[in-house]
Each structure stands twice: as C-alpha cells, then as structure tokens.
Amino acid sequence: MNKPQSFFHLHLISDATGETLLAAGRAASAQYKDARAIEHIYPLIRTEKQVTKVFEDIEEEPGIILYTVVDQKLARGIDERCAAMGLPCVSVLEPVLTVFQSYLGTPAGRRVGAQHVLDAEYFRRIDALNFTMEHDDGQLPANMDDADIVLVGISRTSKTPTSIYLANRGIKTANIPIVIGVPVPESLVNATKPLIVGLI
C-alpha cells in the first residue's frame, strides 16, 4: 500500500482567470486533510508556446494537472503531454459540457471565459493578470512604479502563486527574486507607488 503523501503539487491550467479551477481543486483537496496541495496556477494560457513553458515547470515539480481550456487542439496537446509524462490530468469542464451537449442536442460555443460577466471589474482583473504575468520573476523591472504590489524574496517563497492570487483580485503584482551577489533593480529601490512586501 502506498504511504499517504504529506503534500502534493496541483497544477491548474486555465485559458481565463483560473477561478473555476481553483474552486474545483480546493474543493477536492479539502477532502484530504493529511495531504496539503501546493498550488501552481497558470492563467491566460492560450498558445502552444505558453503550454510548453507550463510543462517545463510541471516537469520540475510533477503532480496532478487540472485544466479548463476550450481550444480542443490545445486541450489534446495537454492530454498528450500528461500521458507522455505519466501524470494524472483532468479537463474539469469537459464532462459537464458533454452532459449539456447530450441533453440540449447542440455543441458548446467554446467561448473562453464565458462564465465571467464582462464588466469593468472583470477587465480590471484581466489587466492585472496580464501585468502580473509580464512582471513575473524579475521581468520588466523598469516598470515597478506601475505595480500595486511588488513581492520580493528568495527562491521558493511562493512569489509567483501569491502574485497570481492577488492579480485574480485585480491587484497588479510584480515579483523580484533576491539572489545573493545580485543587486536588486534600481527601479525597485526608487519605486514610490507600490507596496513592497518581503516573503520569507
């Protein structure tokens, strides 16, 4: 019998904000009180190049993959990569869409993010997510004053997951790695607008 794991990696791949996946993943992982899910959230994944980058991360920390991607070619690619790596992989919406299609007699429209109301709040969150993805791991450091929050910390302090969590709430978040012997960007030292938070 396999010994229960104390933690596992949960990779959530979404072509929209990832909130649907996050809710489903947390509902399932809550049933396993002795195993903590380390969440890796990948929102706005809509190209093969982005999928390749995601799976480079997954290869380093393999685990369960849940996804909501309406582009069927992209979804097949995710399934194939998971099969090649021997990792469990579930399209969270596909079984539900299959039931709807069978009952209603018509295929789904396959609209990305169709469950979200397209109001100002939604677009604010998408804008924050785009900003956060562009400013992950020290990218585009010259734009620090455009951020609402800048997270700084050494490796493995959950800078990226925390950034995406905040972005899903409309907060433009950048994160900067602290590396021994490498000075922090001057733009961070001179930043006056964002809240700067150190993670340990």
Image (cartoon, grey):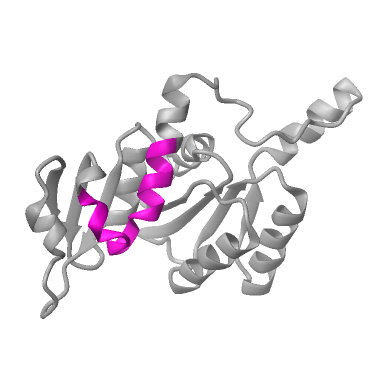
Magenta stretch: dominant secondary structure: helix
Residue located farthest toward the bottom when viewing the structure as drawn:
181
Place of residue 42 in the rendered image (x, y in percent of width and height, measured from the top left): 48, 51
Residue at point 43%, 66% (across, down):
3
Mark yes or no: residue 175 visible: no
Residue 15 is situated, as x and y percent measured from the top left of the image, at: 58, 45
Q: Is residue 2 above or below residue 159?
A: below
Q: Is residue 122 magenta?
A: no
Looking at the picture, tell me which residue is in the foreground, 162 or 136.
Answer: 136
Question: Which quarter of the figure has residue 49?
Answer: bottom right
In this rendering, does residue 97 appear at all? Answer: yes
Nearest the eye: 158 or 177: 177
User: x, y (%) of residue 119?
Assistant: 49, 19
Residues in magenta, as a range: 127-144
- Quarter placement of the C terminus: bottom left
User: Which residue sits at x=26%, y=65%?
Assistant: 156
Furthest toward the right, the residue is 105
Left or right, 182 with reference to 124: left
In this picture, residue 145 sits left or right of residue 103: left
Q: Is residue 137 magenta?
A: yes
Which is more toward the observer, 178 or 35? 178
Q: Is residue 29 left or right of residue 98?
A: left
Please provide percent x and percent y for residue 160. 33, 55
Q: Residue at x 9, y 44 (%)?
A: 192
34 relative to 105 in the view: left or right: left
User: How many marks can you see?
Assistant: 0
Q: Residue at x 76, y 49 (%)?
A: 72
